[in-house]
């Protein structure tokens, strides 16, 4: 993708589709189930596509579930840190603040969550609604859902790309 591709695309939905197509093409050989491989591979992408890789699952979780389910499905601390970094890069500071506060709560429950999600005899769906983690994350879920209704993460990503095309196309570490 080039700067001209961004500026020539007047429709936000079409711009997102183009980003998603390029993302799919560039990540087709990466295994998203292998967090280390996924993180190292997506860090080589242009900043906009790295951000897409880093926030997409959170966007899905906010729309479908809540933060506890997100953390259970994506039980990898570096992945959560990458998501936080991407939120800040795309200028979603309000969502980043809520996510960062939720991570502080999560950190207190990290080991027990790991035991639950990795234990074949304990069902997360049974454990979670009765847990302290559920109770403590509730306020952050409510705020995330409010913010999502104002502007979703993928909408914010497209706005970032539109406002910062040259930065969005540079490698993450540039």
Image (cartoon, grey):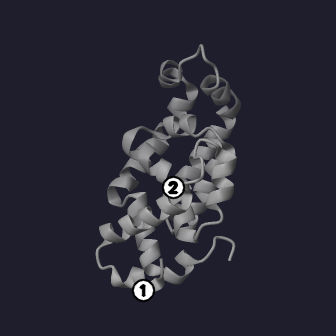
- Front-most of 129 and 136? 129
Q: Which residue is mark 1?
A: 4
For residue 87, say whether it is visible: no
- Front-most of 34 and 79? 34
Which residue lies at the image location 43% right of the left edge and 59% below the top edge?
A: 153
Furthest-top residue in view?
A: 121
Which residue lies at the image location 33% right of the left edge and 54% below the top edge?
A: 149
Nearer the observer: mark 2 or 1; the answer is 1
The vertical placement of 85 against 129, above or below, is below
Image quadrant for the C terminus?
Answer: bottom right
Q: Which residue is mark 2?
A: 55
For residue 146, say whether it is visible: yes
In the visual, does 138 lie left or right of 133?
left
- Front-most of 79 and 66? 79
Furthest-left residue in view?
A: 11
Please report whichever mark, 2 or 1, sits nearer to the chain's N-terminal start. 1
The vertical placement of 29 against 7, above or below, is above
Secondary structure under tag 2 reads helix
Residue 7 location (% of width, % of height):
38, 84
């Amino acid at each position: 993708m080039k700067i001209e591709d961004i500026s020539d695309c007047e429709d936000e939905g079409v711009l997102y589709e183009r980003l998603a197509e390029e993302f799919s093409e560039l990540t087709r050989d990466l295994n998203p189930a292998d967090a280390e491989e996924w993180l190292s591979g997506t860090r080589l992408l242009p900043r906009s596509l790295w951000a897409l890789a880093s926030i997409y699952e959170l966007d899905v979780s906010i729309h479908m579930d809540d933060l506890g389910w997100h953390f259970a499905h994506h039980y990898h601390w570096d992945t959560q840190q990458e998501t936080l970094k991407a939120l800040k890069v795309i200028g979603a500071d309000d969502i980043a603040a809520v996510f960062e506060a939720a991570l502080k709560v999560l950190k207190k429950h990290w080991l027990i969550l790991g035991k639950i999600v990795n234990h074949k005899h304990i069902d997360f769906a049974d454990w979670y609604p009765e847990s302290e983690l559920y109770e403590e994350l509730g306020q952050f879920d409510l705020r995330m859902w409010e913010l999502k209704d104002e502007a979703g993460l993928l909408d914010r990503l497209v706005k970032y790309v539109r406002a910062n095309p040259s930065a969005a196309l540079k490698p993450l570490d540039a």
